[in-house]
Image (tube, coloured by chain):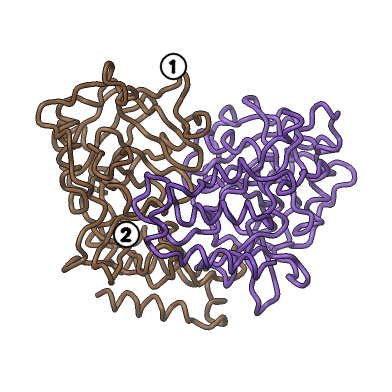
Chain colours: A purple, B brown
Amino acid sequence: MTRHALAFALTLALLPAAQAAEGAKRKSAQEIVDAAPASAWRDLDQANLLYLTLPRGQVVIELAPGFAPAHVANIRALARGGFWNGTSVYRVQDNFVAQWGDADSDDPAKARPLPAGVAAHLPAEFTRSAKGLRFDRLPDADGWAPQVGFVDGFPAARDPKTGKVWIAHCYGVVGAGRNNPPDSSTGAELYAVIGQSPRALDHQLSVVGRVVRGIELLSSLPRGPAPIGVYADPAQRTPILAAAIGSDLPPAQRLPLQALRTDSQAFREATEARRNRVDAFYTQPAGHIDLCNVPLPVREAPAAR
Amino acid sequence: MTRHALAFALTLALLPAAQAAEGAKRKSAQEIVDAAPASAWRDLDQANLLYLTLPRGQVVIELAPGFAPAHVANIRALARGGFWNGTSVYRVQDNFVAQWGDADSDDPAKARPLPAGVAAHLPAEFTRSAKGLRFDRLPDADGWAPQVGFVDGFPAARDPKTGKVWIAHCYGVVGAGRNNPPDSSTGAELYAVIGQSPRALDHQLSVVGRVVRGIELLSSLPRGPAPIGVYADPAQRTPILAAAIGSDLPPAQRLPLQALRTDSQAFREATEARRNRVDAFYTQPAGHIDLCNVPLPVREAPAAR
């Protein structure tokens, strides 16, 4: 299947210019996604969705238990224990990350206690074994990793030499903040990428998921001061009014979200339509797409709309 | 000189792990920039600086007359004619661009007239000849172009086959909005990149410069609705209170900005320190940096601080 995806993409990438010029007849990426059959969409598991309620709306994060099982278990326990209710987004560094949790976590006198059932120490979960794992590979070159593609709907990179795979730090990806020791994250302090993909962080932090709704609520927050964007005045923080796992919410409060499957024909075709744009606006196809430029469409299930 | 830079970077990139482990003794990128001699900095030419005054502060753009001479000439005439005073940032699309100018430009009945001396039609300025042009090349692989590096302080890409060079759509880069005809931009409608570098736009638009101060004032604006982020309600627009070219401003209102020269040893060393991070936080060096991840430091001249 991966081989098929590759062959498909390469074939289109090698289309001669004359055929590319017929682009007006080909569908745009959006048209392809809009026309995708129901089978191309997967329901997001509510047990893997973290809902953060901010004053201006809701941020929904799809967690990645396949990549960071211990962190995701802790995040579920933190949400259930009410840890984040009343905490804040306290750091927003331009072109880098927005970070939330307990702004006083480094101050033993003020730090919030971890709720019962939350582990105070977790292993580093920077990579996982690629063995037997479906990897919907992109044919496109990448400077940061030998291979890039998608695993479980997350943008990912793979190294055949080490046999490891990891989630790449693309826009909207969420990781667990830590101090210098690699195993110093608990999942209580989380960050989301809001700028140019900081891929230098790849396989150096435990990535726990990605924002699937409401990233604009984080990316549009006022920036904090240099060097790392922590607000100087606590009044500038954005309060987190509530945080909950979808499966713990009353059904009426769950969003019936679906993601386009990265092993679907529609996803491959939409990616190709972005790799070689056919819109009248573009004067020539790029013949390339970067892992972090590939949109990963999420919608509400049509029946619920 | 380019060859020297390459050799230098490659040498460091190939440092064995044992030496990398001695990283604690090596300087961080910030330390290298802070210690750069005065000769490593160049004064920005005030004739090439466009100052936009927004309600929350000032955005300063360094224009690129070497890449888009006709557009830059028009931008200077637009500023001198007061075209942007009272216009707005009317489009903010998450993970893409913030765009400003006359929100009614597509409506002949409401569109602002162009001031005297402003050309209503310009040539497309998508690329320029690389012949004889200094190109501070990065050794790092890039998926979008055969070669990447820096020209005149701008992130750039070069194709030896076509002999062309162009500014890459990295974070903060500013281009001239256009309609479908390649030569339909005037410089009156400008956009700045506020997300993952949309390099598919490279050499498809006339890039006119980059934001050197205040990008966070654009990147933190509320996002407009899908599909392209144009605010539905005019009240959501961010007014542009004034726009002026630096050399037209009273000296006291000019910012004495300096950029780190991309042909300086400090720049090469700082880039290498980011390519292979030595901070205690990093568990292993990446051995790579993406063109759009390379910071291009700008400061106020020390004498003026």
Horizontal and vertical percent for residue B75? 20, 37
Give the position of the N terminus of chain A as an image quadrant: bottom right
> Residue sitting at 85 percent across and 30 percent down?
A251
In three-dimensional space, the C-alpha distance between marks 2 and 1, rounded to whole angstroms, equals 37 Å
> Residue sitting at 44 percent across and 28 percent down?
B230
- Chain containing mark 2: B
Dividing the picture into quadrants, the one containing residue A200 is bottom right
Q: Label 1 amino acid?
A: Ala
Q: Is residue A271 left or right of residue B130?
A: right
Between B165 and A129, the residue placed more toward the observer is B165
| Above or below: residue A164 compared with residue B179 | below
Between B90 and A121, the residue placed more toward the observer is B90
Q: Which of the two discs, 2 and 1, labels the residue nearer the N terminus?
A: 2
Residue sitting farthest toward the right: A117
Q: Is residue A103 visible?
A: no
Horizontal and vertical percent for residue A15? 45, 64
Horizontal and vertical percent for residue B68? 20, 49
Between A55 and A45, the residue placed more toward the observer is A45
